[in-house]
Image (cartoon, rainbow, N blue to C red):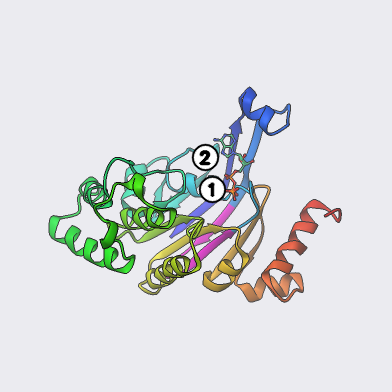
Amino acid sequence: MIEIRNLTKIYKLNKKQMKESKTTNPIKTAVDDLSLRAVPGEIYGLLGPNGAGKTTTLRCISTIIRPTRGEIYVAGHEVQKEPEQVRERIGFLTGDIKLDPQFSVDYMFDFFGRLHHVPQEKLQARKEELFEYFEIRDFAHKKIKELSTGMGQKAAIAVCLVHDPDIVIFDEPTNGLDVVTARGVTDYLKKLRNEGKLVIISTHIMSEAEKICDRIGVIIDGQKVAEGRLGEILQETGTEDLEDAFFELYRGRKGEAL
Ligand SMILES: Nc1ncnc2c1ncn2[C@@H]1O[C@H](COP(=O)(O)OP(=O)(O)OP(=O)(O)O)[C@@H](O)[C@H]1O
C-alpha cells in the first residue's frame, strides 16, 4: 500500500527560476497538504494539468526528493526513515532519469539487476519476459543514445521492472509514444494490476485515465480536488466524461474566468 499523509513540498526558487516563472516570490508550493491511499490490485491515476504537482508527488514517494512536510508510507516503510526498504519495493519510471547513453539496453538491464541483487537465473528469466513483451530483442545491443524515443521508453520500463517490484510508479508512462507502443505499455500496467501489484501513474491524458485507472485523484495547484472511481467523479461533478468533469473542477478551483 502507498499512504500519503498531508504531503507538502515547497521548492525555493533561485533567481533564474523566479525569472522563468515570472514571479518575485522565491517560494513555490508544488504540493499542498495532499493525502491519498493506493492499494495493491489497483491502478491509481494522478490526473492534473502541467505544473499541478504530479511529478513532485511521485518523486517524494520514490525517495528521489524529500517532502517538506508530511509522511509517506510505502508497504509500511516511511520514505524518509527507511528509504532503502522503499527503493527495494518500487519500480520508478520517470522522464528525468536517463539511462547511460553509452551503454546498451542489455548491459543496463544486467547492471540494474545486479544493483537490486536479482539472482542470475531470475535475471535471465526477467530479461526473456520483458524483452519479449516490449520487443526489445532487436535493439538490445544498440547504445541507448542510438534509440528512438519509443525504444528508449521501452528500455527504461524494462530496466525499472528488472527486480519485479510489487509497487510500480510510472510518471507519464506513455509520454511521446505512438498509439501502438502506448497500448503495449498500458496493457502491461493492467497485467501488473491483475497480478495484484499496486500501480500508480501520473497523466494529463483524460482518455488514458478513463481507460486504465481504477481510481483517479484529480490534482490542481498541488491539492487533490476530487478522488474516486470514474463513475463517482462524473456523478460528483454532474458530467458525462472525464474531460468535462476536469473542467468543472478546474473552474471551481480557478473561478469562472476560464
Ligand atoms: N526542482 C524544482 N525547483 C523549483 N520548482 C520546481 C521544481 N520541480 C518542479 N517545480 C515546480 O513545481 C510545480 C509542480 O511541478 P511538477 O513537475 O510536480 O508538476 P506536474 O504536475 O508533474 O507537471 P507536468 O505535467 O508539466 O509534468 C511547478 O510549478 C514546477 O515549476
Q: Which mark is residue 67?
A: 2
Give the residue at mark 1. Answer: 55
Determine if the magenta segment contains residue 45.
yes
Residue at mark 2 to residue at mark 1: CA–CA distance: 13 Å
Q: How many numbered marks have been drawn onto this rendered protein structure? A: 2
Residue at the right extreme, as displayed: 257
Q: Is mark 2 within 8 Å of ligand 1?
A: no
Say whether residue 26 is visible.
no
Residue 13: x %, y % from top left = 62, 28
Disc 2 versus disc 1: nearer the observer:
1
Element type where label 2 sits in the image: loop
Say whether residue 29 is visible.
yes
Q: Residue at x 65, y 53 (%)?
A: 49
Q: Amino acid at mark 2?
A: Pro
Of callouts 2 and 1, the N-terminal one: 1
Using residue 239 as the reference point, say whether residue 141 is left or right of it: left
Residue 53: x %, y % from top left = 60, 47
Residue 200: x %, y % from top left = 48, 60
Q: Residue at x 20, y 54 (%)?
A: 118
Region in magenta? 35-46
Element type where label 1 sits in the image: helix
Position of residue 46 relative to residue 96, above or below, is: below
Quarter occupied by residue 232: bottom right
Q: Amino acid at mark 1?
A: Thr
Residue 166: x %, y % from top left = 34, 61
Q: Is mark 1 within 8 Å of ligand 1?
A: yes
Predominant secondary structure in magenta? strand
Determine if the magenta segment contains residue 177.
no
Q: Residue at x 77, y 54 (%)?
A: 253
Position of residue 157 relative to residue 214, above or below, is: above
